[in-house]
């Protein structure tokens, strides 16, 4: 820097609050207690369990099983197709990361659901 040129001066102001020792800490507002997850055994939370959950949804949508809430059988081919498409998507996205047992379950479930879907579309 040459003589006579003003130096760039900047000022730093610390605006953080400090808690004085004689000041009591403010109580933290109580949040709602966390909801405990349902008691599930570790075996129930698995990729195969997800496959079976989606498959069950598809079976109900195909009218092959009664709706658990109403007890009635209703055919909703769009919902069944969505569940089957999700299973196909999961097959693509989890490729190389599934166990042999998960592979077997997924392939059997998809084969069965696709056949059921074809039969359901022929009926309607």
Image (cartoon, rainbow, N blue to C red):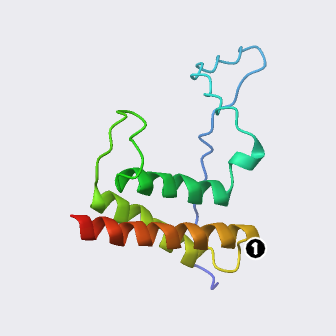
> Looking at this view, is 113 or 86 the one in front?
113
Seen from the viewer's position, the closer of residues 25 and 56 is 56
Residue projecting furthest to the bottom:
2
Q: Is residue 123 above or below residue 32?
A: below
**Mark 1 crowdedness (10 Å alpha carbons): few <14, some 14-19, many ≥20:** few
Q: Position of residue 6 (x, y in %)?
A: 56, 73
Relative placement, left or right, of 6 versus 73 is right
Which residue is depicted at the point 36% across and 53% down? 61
Q: Percent x, y for residue 93?
A: 57, 75
Callout 1: helix, strand or loop? Answer: helix
| Image side of residue 62 versus residue 8, left or right | left
Position of the C terminus, as image quadrant, is bottom left
Instruction: Give coordinates of residue 45: x percent, y percent.
Output: 68, 49
x 50%, y 56%: residue: 54
**108 relative to 92, above or below:** above
Reading the image, the residue beneath label 1 is 100
Along the horizontal axis of the image, is 48 left or right of 85?
right
Residue at position x 49%, y 52% in the image: 56
* Displayed quadrant of residue 94: bottom right
């Amino acid at each position: 820097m040459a003589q006579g040129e003003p130096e760039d001066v900047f000022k730093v102001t610390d605006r953080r609050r400090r808690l004085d020792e004689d000041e009591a800490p403010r109580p933290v507002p109580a949040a709602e207690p966390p909801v405990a997850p349902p008691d599930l055994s570790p075996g129930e939370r698995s990729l195969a369990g997800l496959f079976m959950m989606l498959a069950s949804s598809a079976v109900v949508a195909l009218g092959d099983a009664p709706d658990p809430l109403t007890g009635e059988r209703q055919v909703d081919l769009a919902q069944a197709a969505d569940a089957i498409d999700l299973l196909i998507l999961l097959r693509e996205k989890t490729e190389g990361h599934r166990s042999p047992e998960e592979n077997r379950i997924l392939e059997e479930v998809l084969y069965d659901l696709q056949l059921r879907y074809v039969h359901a579309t022929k009926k309607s």
